[in-house]
Amino acid sequence: MKTHPPVTASYPQTRMRRNRSNKFSQLITSENILSVNDLIMPLFIVEGKGVVQPIDSMPNIFRYSPDKLLELIEEVVLLEIPAIALFPKIENSFKDQAGSLAYDSKNLICSTVRLIKSEFPDLGIICDVALDPYTVHGHDGLLINDEIDNDKTNEALIKQSIVQAEAGCDAVAPSDMMDGRVLAIRRALDEKGFQNTQIISYAAKYASSFYGPFREAVGSNSVKNVIDKSSYQMNPSNSDEAMREINLDINEGADMIIIKPGMPYLDIIYRASTEFNIPILAYQVSGEYSMISHASKQGYIDYKKSIFESLISFKRAGACGILSYFSIDVARILKDRQ
């Protein structure tokens, strides 16, 4: 982060508006620039063939069966978006108390990763590591005696990470917020010969009200509409705690970290970028996406301008990458500008 000496110049000899007075100087004085290399596209998948399901709470976002996902990914690759993040929608009949399908090597995520890699080997694939899409209760971990059992959950997350690495994902992304899971996963991956599989840790994931549309998309709210995850996700009031969480994950072997949600926690992104020398990703979550989408649909805000303003705020705060449901639209706009 740059530091600047005290400003001694003053008006009228210094006029800050001069550098804003024409297009060329606006361009060359831009301190942050958004490019397609900053983008990661989250994608939702479902079982079946020829399936494209709309998600009511997320305009223009769909769940895709693997064959239809490949068609979309062809455009993702042509747009040069470097990576995708996969999230499954599991039928209720396949869910159980332990979320055991999460570590079945033939599950939807693993089979889809193998399919994508067979067609697009150079596309980065990030797999979510958490149990909530697979459990009947919708929690990220194992619910035992009405409490989330941290250490038993870590054992399940290890198994989930291994089958995802075996399927060919480039990075596993534990989003569960269990204590010690990064170290446990790193050791297990290394023991199995997956030293090059990255861990992109959701190091500071808050117990946010902005996740509602996502939970609809993956069906983790299908049993209980309101799920209290505050015993493992972070208190929105806390920032020092986030720095401790990030520090722990770095020391346990995280290669990159994710801060989630994005816009309400720009201060956390900024603090992390100044305190830690590690790549930081911001997740512009489903609630943020839906607010911008619905407001622009009603004509209250400009769609393109509000998207770019929101995404550049993450870069300004110190993020080097952004998970955003706007990624494909943004990449299209950027390509048209070339």
Image: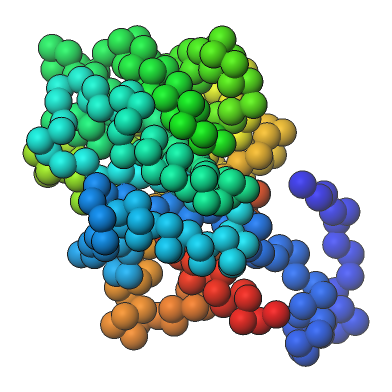
Q: Is residue 235 above or below residue 32?
A: above
Specify whether residue 70 is in view. yes
Colouring method of the image: rainbow
> Where is residue 73 drawn, in percent x and y?
48, 59
The extreme bottom residue here reads 22
Which residue is rendered at x = 77% and y = 89% of the image?
Answer: 22
Q: Where is residue 4 in the image (x, y as percent from the top left)?
A: 84, 54
Q: In this view, does 138 lie to the left or right of 128?
A: left
| Residue at (25% x, 27% y) in the render | 101
Q: Is residue 42 left or right of residue 168?
A: left
In the rendered view, tell whether residue 197 sits above or below residue 12: above
Nearest the eye: 285 or 88: 88
Horizontal side of 171 relative to 12 (left or right) equals left
Residue farthest toward the front in the current orientation of the protein: 118
Residue 169 x, y percent position in the rendering: 51, 36
Q: Which of 162 and 135 is in front in this view?
A: 162
User: On the image, which quarter does residue 255 sit in?
Assistant: top right
The total of numbered circles placed on residues is 0
Q: Which of 166 and 316 is in front in this view?
A: 166
What residue is at 44 percent from the left and 41 percent from the top?
113
Percent x, y for residue 201?
Answer: 51, 31
Position of residue 257 relative to residue 99, above or below, is: below
Res 278 quadrant in image: top right
Image quadrant holding the C terminus, namely bottom right
Is 95 on the left-hand or right-hand side of 273? Answer: left
- Seen at 82% across and 49% down, the residue is 3
The answer to whether residue 205 is seen in the rendering is: no
